[in-house]
Image (cartoon, helix red, strand yellow):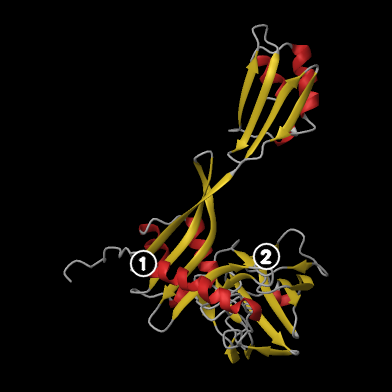
């Protein structure tokens, strides 16, 4: 509830100087951005005249003002961020999330790992006990204080069928995550448009509608999820339609390259700024799960058209992004050889098996 002038006066800074400083400091930091929990430090002489003022919003956002003659030299400090490599590894027991947590990972790292392989693996339904995960990633520090995770540098997921790997590579010609063959792990379309609990209804040309009780085509995948669950665009594109439409309820239609269109039905609301003609990026939130229109409960009705015809998105083979440039292939091969050895050397932590009583 305090403004900057009140803060300074409470510290004993004379009213006239406090007011003059507050006006000067606004050019560097807008006091309206102040929030509870922010920290500040005040330096003054014996008469209470202000000599220096520091305002700290976070370990990497610090503003400083120093008295110079009759004025002030104010600026945002350049904070050096230290990147330390760290590793995580484990074996899936009951759930991927819990297994990651038991291996020492936080939520941010888990979501980063899931997003990295989300184009190829449906972790909600395909991860099984015994699957193994490993990753080398960055932990970021400022002034010795941990401030969050940085980039995943190398990662692998080994299930019963495949050994998925991803490595971060950057050069003048290529940048992104690629597999052991130099192919992009980023596909043109995401595997699913949300984090869902289950598929409540699949693609079916002749389905008995649960509300109308009539047999009709259901060219969609219904994803059951709580109301308000974020829904994201599965690929880059342009919003073609964002409005309410009869039994479909609140709906968004996005036009993509290669004659694809995606449909998102029964939304509870739209994301801010989503409207016809607006460009959206892959993974951008476009709306939230609901049950508008004719629906038995909250879910997302997700549909895909190709060349004007409905297709089953779970069976469509979407093309990957550009591979590592040919000129980089030799260097990339040497690069990932070292990272593969690093991944192989990480010791996996197998979580304790949960056994039912009497078994």
Residue 58 vertical placement versus 237 (above, below) = above
Whole-percent x, y for residue 99 in the image: 37, 63
Identify the mark nearer the N-term, 2 or 1: 2
| Disc 2 packing (10 Å; few <14; some 14–19; many ≥20) | some
Residue for badge 1:
345
Residue for badge 2:
284
Whole-percent x, y for residue 313 in the image: 61, 84
* Residue closest to the eye, 256 or 48: 48
Residue 218 vertical placement versus 45 (above, below) = below
Q: Is residue 279 left or right of residue 129?
A: right
Which residue, as the protein is rendered here, is positioned at the far top?
47
Q: Are marks 2 and 1 in contact (CB under 8 Å)?
A: no
Which residue, as the protein is rendered here, is positioned at the far left?
358
Q: Identify the residue at image location x=70%, y=72%.
A: 249
* Residue closest to the eye, 24 or 130: 24
Q: Nearer the viewer, mark 2 or mark 1?
A: 1
Residue 38 seen by the camera: yes
Residue 175 placement: quadrant:
bottom right
Residue 225 vertical placement versus 320 (above, below) = above
Q: What's the CA distance linking mark 2 and mark 1? A: 36 Å
* Residue closest to the eye, 85 or 205: 85
């Amino acid at each position: 509830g305090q403004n900057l002038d009140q803060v300074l006066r409470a510290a004993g800074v004379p009213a006239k100087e406090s007011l003059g400083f507050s006006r000067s400091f606004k050019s560097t930091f807008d006091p309206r951005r102040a929030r509870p929990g922010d920290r500040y430090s005040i330096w003054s002489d014996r008469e209470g005249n202000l000599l220096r003022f520091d305002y700290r919003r976070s370990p990497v956002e610090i503003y400083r003002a120093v008295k110079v003659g009759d004025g002030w030299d104010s600026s945002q400090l350049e904070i050096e961020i230290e990147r330390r490599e760290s590793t995580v590894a484990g074996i899936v027991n009951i759930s991927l999330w819990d297994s990651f947590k038991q291996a020492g990972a936080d939520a941010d790292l888990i979501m980063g790992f899931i997003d990295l392989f989300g184009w190829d693996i449906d972790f909600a339904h395909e991860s099984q006990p015994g699957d193994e995960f490993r990753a080398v990633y960055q932990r970021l520090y400022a002034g010795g204080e941990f401030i969050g995770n940085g980039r995943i540098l190398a990662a692998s997921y080994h299930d019963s069928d495949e050994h998925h790997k991803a490595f971060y590579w950057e050069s003048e010609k290529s940048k992104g995550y690629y597999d052991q063959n130099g192919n992009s792990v980023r596909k043109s379309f995401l595997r699913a448009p949300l984090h869902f609990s289950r598929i409540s209804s699949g693609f079916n040309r002749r389905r008995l509608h649960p509300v109308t009780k009539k047999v009709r085509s259901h060219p969609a995948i219904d994803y059951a999820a709580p109301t308000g669950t974020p829904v994201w665009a599965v690929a880059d594109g342009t919003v073609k339609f964002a409005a309410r439409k009869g039994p479909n309820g609140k709906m968004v239609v996005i036009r993509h390259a290669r004659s694809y269109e995606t449909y998102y039905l029964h939304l509870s609301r739209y994301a801010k700024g989503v409207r016809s003609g607006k460009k959206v990026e892959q993974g951008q939130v476009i709306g939230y799960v609901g049950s508008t229109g004719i629906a038995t409960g909250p879910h997302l009705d997700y549909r895909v058209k190709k060349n004007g015809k409905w297709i089953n998105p779970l069976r469509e083979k979407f093309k990957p992004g550009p591979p590592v440039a040919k000129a980089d292939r030799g260097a990339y091969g040497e690069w990932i050889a070292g990272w593969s050895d690093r991944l192989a050397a990480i010791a996996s932590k197998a979580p304790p098996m949960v056994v039912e009583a009497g078994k």
